[in-house]
Amino acid sequence: MANQEIFDKLRDAIVNQNVAGIAQLTQEALAAGIAPIDIITKGLSLGMKIIGDKFEAAEIYLPQIMMSAKAMSVAMEILTPELEKTKVEGEETGLAITFVAEGDIHDIGHRLVTTMLGANGFEILDLGTDVLNETVVEEAAKHKGQKVLLVGSALMTTSMLGQKDLMDRLKEENLKDSVKCMFGGAPVSKKWIEEIGADATAENAAEAAKVALEVMK
């Protein structure tokens, strides 16, 4: 079976909420010698993007989103140990404090990015979803003096607005110059990143890891 055919099947399994079949497809992709990162970016993530677009267009509803997310989680349970095997060794990259903004519980993209950062040498502190900016600032203060990257995600415009508040709080606490800040999510743009004074954004999980490494150099 050609790689593209495998990618298409993985994509369709996510779109069709095929929780029962996703594990076998993921194992078949690994057995075919496809790199875990390619399985994610060229197959699974494309499925989640389609699901996200359908949700925005009101073509599907929350139960379908949840089932697709469950299928994604099953695949990631298989792929995460494989990603760990390719973890970059050498000089310490830094601490990545990852979180989903207050009022937002959408964590698929967040978990993907967190996994990819870990696979690229970052020490991970995952604060989870619906995280108060106050909590993020407290954690940044605890680790002042270390190489720290704050990585926040927001799927909704309302939760995205909290990113500006976080940047303001970091400045007030004299922490802005001691950390790097990276934000992502559907409504986040490079223009928004510049507007709030953050350091970077990325289109997907794989790009996020590359951008994060550049930011921390």
Image: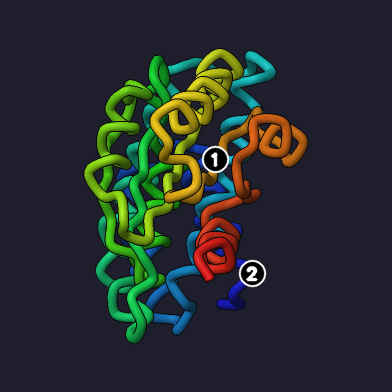
Camera-side residue: 17 or 161? Answer: 161
Counting residues from the N terminus, which is met first, the one under dot 2 or under dot 1? 2
Mark sitting on residue 183: 1
- Three-letter amino acid code of the residue under disc 2: Gln
Amino acid type assigned to the residue bearing label 1 in the image: Phe
**What SS does tag 2 mark?**
helix
Q: Is residue 102 above or below residue 112?
A: above
Q: Nearer the viewer, mark 2 or mark 1?
A: 1
Q: Quadrant of residue 64?
A: top left
Does residue 110 sit above or below 135 in this rendering? below
- Identify which residue, 190 or 13, lies in the foreground: 190
Which structural element holds mark 1? strand
Q: Is residue 127 above or below residue 38?
A: above
> Which residue is rendered at x = 69% and y = 18% of the image?
57
Q: Which image quarter holds the N terminus?
A: bottom right
Res 140 label: none
Q: How many marks?
A: 2
Picture disc at residue 4: 2
Residue occupying image coordinates x 59% and y 22%? 55
**Which residue is at 28% across, 27% downward?**
135
- The spot of residue 178 in percent (x, y) is 43, 50
Q: Determine the CA span between mark 2 and mark 1.
A: 31 Å
Name the image quarter holding residue 118: bottom left
Residue 9 visible in the current orientation: no
Inspect this view and state whether residue 78 appears. Answer: yes
User: Which residue is at 51% across, 20% downward?
Assistant: 165
| Nearer to us in this view, 20 or 183 | 183
Residue 12: x and y, percent? 55, 47
